[in-house]
Image (cartoon, rainbow, N blue to C red):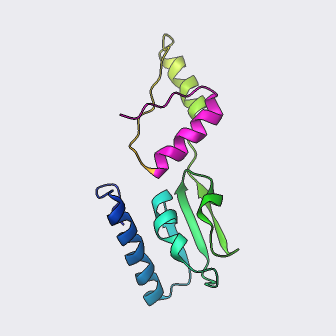
Amino acid sequence: MNMRLRNDEEWKVKSGQIAYEQMMSFDPDVVIACDDNAQQYFVSLIPVENETPIIFCGVNNDPALYSYPNEKTTGVLERPFPLKSLKMAKAIYPSIKTVAFIGDDTNSTQGYIGFLSNQLKLCIYVKI
């Protein structure tokens, strides 16, 4: 869907529609949708009556946000290990006092920020 390089809303909607049309013409036995944008702009187009199993991966947001069309949906959330990563960084470089997590302005990053906020209980987000 190429949304990292082309991330305007018009393209996101169009690429989701193209993916959906290809899926319908191909009639796959299973759909694998990777990342939050694929869920929002492609999987969300699949009608409820469609019985094709869906596997998601690379999802940072709560999967409930995407209203999956059927109960044949499963997948893997993309979950970092911020506390373990910080502990290891601190072991290597004990004088660390401030850490910045930097990401692009995407659905995935928004989900990651939410996860970090819950894990760290202190997360300041500044949009540049």
- Horizontal placement of 65 versus 58: left or right? right
- Quadrant where the N terminus sits is bottom left
* Residue 13 in the image, given as x and y percentages of width and height: 39, 68
- Quadrant where the C terminus sits is top left
Q: What stretch is highlighted in magenta?
A: 107-128
Extreme residue in the front direction: 10
Tell me the quarter of the picture where residue 88 sits. Answer: top right
Q: Looking at the picture, does residue 94 appear above or below residue 9? A: above
What is the magenta segment's predominant secondary structure? helix
Residue situated in front as seen by the camera: 12 or 82: 12
Q: Looking at the picture, does residue 28 appear above or below residue 105? A: below
Extreme residue in the top direction: 95
Extreme residue in the right direction: 71
Tally the marks.
Answer: 0
Is residue 1 located in the magenta-colored stretch of the structure?
Answer: no
Tell me the quarter of the picture where residue 20 sits. Answer: bottom left
Extreme residue in the left direction: 5
Identified at 47% across, 23% down, the residue is 99
Identified at 60% across, 25% down, the residue is 122
* Residue 52 in the image, given as x and y percentages of width and height: 60, 82
Is residue 111 located in the magenta-colored stretch of the structure?
Answer: yes
Identified at 45% across, 32% down, the residue is 101
Identified at 46% across, 82% down, the residue is 23
* Residue 107 in the image, given as x and y percentages of width and height: 47, 51
Q: Can residue 35 be seen in this view?
A: no
Q: Can residue 65 be seen in this view?
A: yes
* Residue 116 in the image, given as x and y percentages of width and height: 58, 35
